[in-house]
Amino acid sequence: MKATSTLYLILYLMVSCIASCTSENSKSGRQKNQEETADKKEVQAPVHDYLREGNKGVGGVNHFDRKPFDAQLADQGNKLFIVKCTICHEVKEDKIGPALYGVTKKRTPEWILNMMLTPDQMLAQDPDAISLSQSYDGMMTNMGLNEQEAKSILEYLRQEDAK
């Protein structure tokens, strides 16, 4: 009797699997890709908020409006990061300068923006920037960014830190 129940269970599972596989195979490739893309979008980790407390650095940025994540701004920042920053930085590995992964979780946005916009002032007067620069061969140079460009790079780094 037990063997018969087990046999029925195995047959039921096999039929269920075959029906499921047949149903999956009948979907068009495009429909499957759309569903997979939608699933991936839902799984993406939420982007963290900027730090509120901590050293703000030295320079023209004393206050930063913390807005919701802006994917379009982050995309612009990614492009600028490639052109302006990858000479010395990578996101996940040290180069001439430090790896930038996690920077938005360790530093305030004001500090990061001041470091991008006025590195000379930061390296001359900010204790954290001075200490950090002593660990690397090169010094941060002014890349000629305006505040909007620096904010877009900051948003890109924020996105990377959420991964």
Image: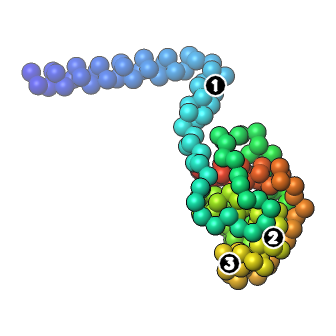
Mark identifier at residue 34: 1
The quadrant in which residue 45 appears is top right
Gap between marks 1 and 2 measured at Cα: 45 Å
Q: Name the outermost residue toward the left.
A: 1
Left or right: residue 124 versus residue 162 is: right
Q: Could you say which is closer to the camera, residue 87 or residue 152?
A: 152
> Is residue 137 something one can see in this rendering?
yes
Marks 1/3: CA–CA distance = 50 Å
Residue type marked 1: Gln
Mark 1 or mark 3, earlier in chain: 1
Q: Residue at x 70, y 52 (%)?
A: 64
In the image, which is nearer the foreground, mark 1 or mark 3?
Answer: 3
Q: Which residue is mark 2?
A: 119
- Callout 1 secondary element: helix
Q: Position of residue 119 (x, y in %)?
A: 81, 70
* Residue type for callout 3: Pro
Is disc 3 surrounded by few (<14), some (14 to 19) or many (20+) residues within 10 Å?
some
Looking at the image, residue 49 lies above or below residue 35: below
Residue 92 can be seen in this image: no
- Give the image quarter of residue 121: bottom right
Question: Residue 114 location, x and y as percent?
Answer: 77, 63
Q: Observer-nearest residue: 67 or 83?
A: 67
Name which residue lies at 63% across and 27% down.
33
Say which of 105 and 29 sits in front.
Answer: 105
Residue 127: give its label: 3
Circle 2: element type:
helix
Q: Quadrant of the N terminus?
A: top left
